[in-house]
Amino acid sequence: MHHYTQGKPTRQGHKGIPEGQFEEEQGLKGFFGPVSHLIKSQPSTRWTNIDGPLRPHMFDLVQLDRSVGSQRLLYNSSIAIHMSFIDVYQPEQATAVRNADGDLLYFCHKGSGEVFTEYGLLKYSPGQYIVVPRCLHHTIFPSKKSEFFIVENKTSHYEEPERGLVGRHAIYDPNALFKPELELQKERFRSLGLAVKEIAVKRLDEVTRFQYADCVYSDVLGWKGDLYPFTLHMDHMMPLMSHRAHLPPSAHTTFVARDFVICTFLPRPLEKDKDALKVPFYHQNIDYDEVLFYHDGDFFSRDNLHAGMMSFHPQGFPHGPHPKAVKSVDSKTETSEYAVMVDTRWPLQIDAALSNVELGDYWKSWRA
Ligand SMILES: [Fe+2]
């Protein structure tokens, strides 16, 4: 289809929207594909009632039962999203895990510690992504009680996003991807007197335990190649921005998979142009279900949010900023939010356990 206009459209998306009017973006392929901007007299989030299973969701994951260890949150055949709570434990309790069902991306929400891998030692702290490819055994070894938002990629492998015009050092430099350190791990095992002798392998969501007479991390003498676990910290990411017009969430893509993308929202200055829209625009990201995990900071586009919450906006209706955020944005010059977004190509199911931590009135929250 070619570009076409009717009525009174704006010249530039996300800018110059007449006072009292609202822009709604309807787009395909996660903001990369065909797109239209509708100028409306009222936002499309003004529903008065929703009768049926489809609705926006907000979950307070702080209220989850931490004693479960790990809780599945959302899932379909290509992805599973979990929250995991790991206590500090004694070295003799350490076991290794290996996931044959997919690559694992751990996002550290709280805590700190180390990850032992066959390739060497990685360290983590809040705001760190840890990517462990499918079938590589590893042990999370917290020095502080840790909480992870985990995204299991069942149908592909995590890759860096295309940087296109801005070059491969934008968003994050490839040198910001931390590699495992084999010698450091050997020293650490010696000082801890650690020997991990069991690997718990998950395949088709069933666990099989492989036991060994000696440590499953002590046999690697060296390695080479381009397949290995790695970390990336939010502090080492350089968000793209335009000082003139709001950029879509796709500008903040951190990792891509076949059936979903991971984006990271970080503090940034707000747009400087007087007529620029400074809050995220109302939109239908038509092909994608959208999940947002709030890690830290002040979440300016929503009311009553705190760190550890997760919103889920399925395909089928538009969403956008809350009315109070639209009113208060003029007094702000920057954002201070840290959040992880997972946009999935195929519809997600909600784990039944989340009904205990859902904010039932969230669907009403766009009312002025
Ligand atoms: Fe969205």
Image (spheres, rainbow, N blue to C red):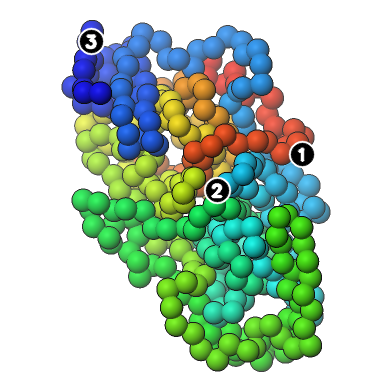
Residue 192 pos. (x, y %): 70, 86
Q: Nearer the viewer, mark 2 or mark 1?
A: 1
Quarter where residue 10 is shown? top left
The reply to whether dot 1 and dot 3 touch (C-beta < 8 Å) is no
For image coordinates 23% across by 40% down, the residue present is 243
State the SS at label 2: strand
Q: Which residue is mark 3?
A: 6
Q: Is residue 253 above or below residue 142?
A: above
Q: Amino acid at mark 3?
A: Gln
Along the polypeptide, which appears first: circle 1 or circle 3? 3
Residue 32 pos. (x, y %): 32, 37
Along the polypeptide, which appears first: circle 2 or circle 1? 2
Q: Is residue 153 visible?
A: yes
Which numbered dot is residue 353? 1
For image coordinates 60% across by 23% down, the residue present is 55
Q: Residues within 10 Å of mark 3 (few under 14, many from 20)?
A: few
- Total residue callouts: 3
Q: Quadrant of the N terminus?
A: top left
For image coordinates 71% across by 86% down, the residue present is 215
Q: Is residue 209 above or below residue 309?
A: below
